Amino acid sequence: MVAVFMTPKLGKARRVEALLTARGVDYTVQVELFGYTLFGSARHGAMFSVAADQAHDCRSALLDAGLGRGVVEEEPGA
């Protein structure tokens, strides 16, 4: 499984979930550390992962759906 999308926002996570489900993609969602607030509190987000052979198509679909800001880029050599 490879990461294709990460967001700290519930609304975006639901949009990604709906898009991947509609396309029949098997995916996992994990809570990951996204960063820290100004006061040092941890901020978490949803990380979506898919099978490596579906990653490119999923990233393209997310970009086409206007969700480019959370797309996790493909690692060089992957």
Image (cartoon, rainbow, N blue to C red):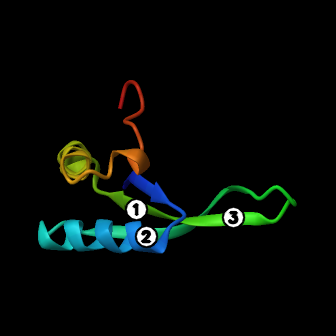
* Sequence-first disc among 1 and 2: 2
Left or right of 75: which side holds 34? right
* Closer to us: 62 or 78: 62
Left or right of 10: which side holds 54? left
Residue under the point 40% across and 54% down:
5
Task: Compute the Cα span from label 2 to label 3.
Answer: 16 Å
Seen as rendered, the residue at the extreme left is: 23
Front position among marks 3 and 1: 3
Amino acid type for the residue under numbered disc 1: Phe
Are the residues flagged by discs 3 and 1 in contact, CB closer than 8 Å? no
Amino acid type for the residue under numbered disc 3: Arg
Residue 21 in the image, given as x and y percentages of width and height: 20, 73
Residue 18 in the image, given as x and y percentages of width and height: 24, 73
Are the residues flagged by discs 1 and 2 in contact, CB closer than 8 Å? yes
Residue under the point 26% across and 50% down:
66
Which circle marks residue 29 in the picture? 2
Residue under the point 22% across and 66% down:
20
Residue 76 in the image, given as x and y percentages of width and height: 40, 25
Which circle marks residue 48 in the picture? 1
Task: Compute the Cα span from label 1 to label 2.
Answer: 5 Å
